[in-house]
Image (cartoon, grey):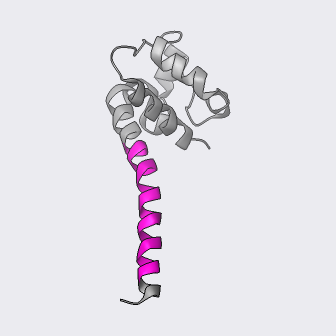
Amino acid sequence: MTMKLLQRIALFSLVIALALPPLAVAQGGIDTYKAKCQACHGAGGIPSEGMAKSMGLKPLGGPSVQSISDADLTAAITNGKGKMKAFKGTLTDAQIKDLVSYIRTLKK
């Protein structure tokens, strides 16, 4: 093999290695969201009109949620907020972190 080919293989491998962890986190966040959050917050973070009215839910991709810090989102998921139940003890810290990362992908 030539040196150029080896360099290209190394560069390609590096790009793949750097891309995989964020993809895994996003997938983990999506799976947890679907299992624990989607029933109330809706597919893609858009609650049904009925849920929005009855529980005061806002779209997770909207500015009122996206402007909340990661620490405050983590606290809301962990400890609950308003009518939302706490997930402390139900979800791991890693799952909660993945959820926050997933919520950030919903930004409009």
State whether residue 74 is above or below residue 19. above
The residue segment tinted magenta is 6-27
Quarter where residue 66 is shown: top right
Q: Main secondary structure of the magenta part?
A: helix
- Where residue 81 appears, as percent x and y from the top left, is 52, 12
Q: Is residue 35 left or right of residue 11?
A: left
Q: Is residue 93 magenta?
A: no
Q: Is residue 53 left or right of residue 28?
A: right
Q: Is residue 24 magenta?
A: yes
**Residue visible at 48% across and 38% down?**
102
Q: Is residue 108 left or right of residue 26?
A: right
**Residue visible at 56% across and 31% down?**
59
- Where residue 79 appears, as percent x and y from the top left, is 48, 11
**Residue visible at 50% across and 26% down?**
49
Task: For the N terminus, give its image quadrant.
Answer: bottom left
Task: Name the one closer to the observer, 40 or 4.
Answer: 4
- Where residue 48 appears, as percent x and y from the top left, is 47, 29
Quarter where residue 9 is shown: bottom left
Task: Name the one closer to the observer, 41 or 12.
Answer: 12
State whether residue 70 is above or below residue 56. below
Tally of marks: 0
Q: Is residue 55 left or right of residue 39?
A: right
Task: For the C terminus, give its image quadrant.
Answer: top right
- Where residue 63 appears, as percent x and y from the top left, is 67, 33
| Residue farthest bottom in this picture | 2
